[in-house]
Image (spheres, helix red, strand yellow):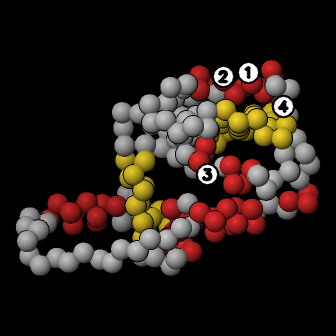
Amino acid sequence: MLYFAVGDLELDGGIQVTASHNPKEYNGMKIVRRGAMPVGGDSGLLDIRDRALAISDMSGGQTPGQVREEDVFPGFVDKVLACVELDEVERRRVVIDAANGMAGVMLPPVLERIPIDAVPYFFEPDGTFPNHAPNPLLPENREFVIGRVLEDKAELGVAFDGDADRCFFIDD
């Protein structure tokens, strides 16, 4: 949604505080620049670090930028669904493990418009991640969704990370 907002609103950039798929003890920032391009070590992040470290006195007349509120959620949902040919989707039973992360917030408006039988698990956001760490890269965090696909007789399982920007697909 951060990438969408920066691109759709033609912003100079954006920052999201996220732990992503890391353990709950950690936070980080996802930074994007104009055009919704990610900022990393090779694309400006080190410059940002150097400029921040060079600021020794914040009383030198810096002025804040403008702040405005924008609800990008409806446009984001429309953009996601524009990537799917809904009339081609066959009704399937799909187990979805949101891992108590952001997928539990972001997916319901998408799922209500897709013709599937979604079986949601752990959609309640909880930063303590009481059920398992939100990192589907680790096999132990996929065990739940694999078990549910089999027990719920689903044809597909999806396990999301904490900020819902990556997922694993599990077939039957």
**In percent of the image, x 17 and y 60: which residue is there?**
53
- CA separation, marks 1 and 2? 6 Å
Q: CA distance from mark 4 to mark 3?
A: 22 Å
Residue 93 percent across, percent down from the top left: 85, 37
Verify CB contact (< 8 Å) between mark 1 and mark 2: yes
Looking at the image, tell me whether mark 4 or mark 1 is earlier in sequence order. 1
Asked if the residues shown at circle 4 and circle 2 are in contact, with their CB atoms under 8 angstroms apart, the answer is no
Residue 147's label in the rendered image is 1
* For marks 3 and 1 on the same chain, the one whose residue lies earlier in the sequence: 3
Coordinates of residue 155 in the picture (x, y in percent): 85, 34
Q: Which residue is mark 3?
A: 106
- Give the label, 4 or 2, closer to the camera: 4
Q: Nearer the viewer, residue 115 or 32?
A: 115
Q: Nearer the viewer, mark 4 or mark 3?
A: 3
- Residue 4 vs residue 14: left or right? right
Q: Which amino acid does the dot numbered 3 rest on?
A: Met
Q: Is residue 54 left or right of residue 153?
A: left
The amino acid beneath tag 4 is: Ala
Query: In the rendered image, which quarter contains the N terminus?
Result: bottom right
